[in-house]
Image (cartoon, rainbow, N blue to C red):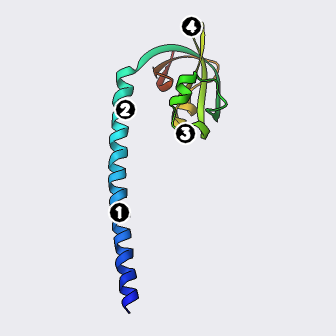
């Protein structure tokens, strides 16, 4: 009888601990997302680009600048992400975008894109 009570108390403490960690983790993620949105709005530029190629690939197989690749979190280096290869003026660049946006971007067309670094935030047909 004594072992059952001890086990239930330990189980209740573990469940409470996971609940507290989940709550604060969720709160931290929301704060981080709002900080990222603020930074994207701050550095966003509208640029006409010609979309050359779209594909879903691992960032380790795509030609990204070495500094950008090293700054990426390890999770994103091996995860498949939507990649857009585009021409800006006479320079060919590789961009990353959201999956929802990736499906809407036309292939082999000129668009006006809002770009923050290597991330395509939104676009409009030219």
Upstream in sequence: badge 4 or badge 3: 3
Identify residue for label 1.
19
Tag 1 and tag 2, C-beta contact below 8 Å:
no
Q: Callout 4 environment at 10 Å: few (<14), some (14 to 19), or many (20+)?
A: few
Q: CA distance from mark 1 to mark 4?
A: 52 Å
Tag 2 and tag 3, C-beta contact below 8 Å:
no
Upstream in sequence: badge 3 or badge 1: 1
Identify residue for label 4.
89
Residue 57 quadrant: top right
Q: Position of residue 90 (x, y in %)?
A: 60, 6
In this rendering, the label closer to the viewer, 1 or 4: 1
Upstream in sequence: badge 2 or badge 3: 2
Give me the disc on residue 37.
Answer: 2
Q: Position of residue 101 (x, y in %)?
A: 52, 32
Q: Quadrant of the N terminus?
A: bottom left
Q: CA distance from mark 2 to mark 3?
A: 21 Å
In this rendering, the label closer to the viewer, 4 or 3: 3
Q: Is residue 67 above or below residue 37?
A: above
In this rendering, the label closer to the viewer, 3 or 1: 3
Identify residue for label 3.
74
Q: Is residue 19 above or below residue 66?
A: below
């Amino acid at each position: 009888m004594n072992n059952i009570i001890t086990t239930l108390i330990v189980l209740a403490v573990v469940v409470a601990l996971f609940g507290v960690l989940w709550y604060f983790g969720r709160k931290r993620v929301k704060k981080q997302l709002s900080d990222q949105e603020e930074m994207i709005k701050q550095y966003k530029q509208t640029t006409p680009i010609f979309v050359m190629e779209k594909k879903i690939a691992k960032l380790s197989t795509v030609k990204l600048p070495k500094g950008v690749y090293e700054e990426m979190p390890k999770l994103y280096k091996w995860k498949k992400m939507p990649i857009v290869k585009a021409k800006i003026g006479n320079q060919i660049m590789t961009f990353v975008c959201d999956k929802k946006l990736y499906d809407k971007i036309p292939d082999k067309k000129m668009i006006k894109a809002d770009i923050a670094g290597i991330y395509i935030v939104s676009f409009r047909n030219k």
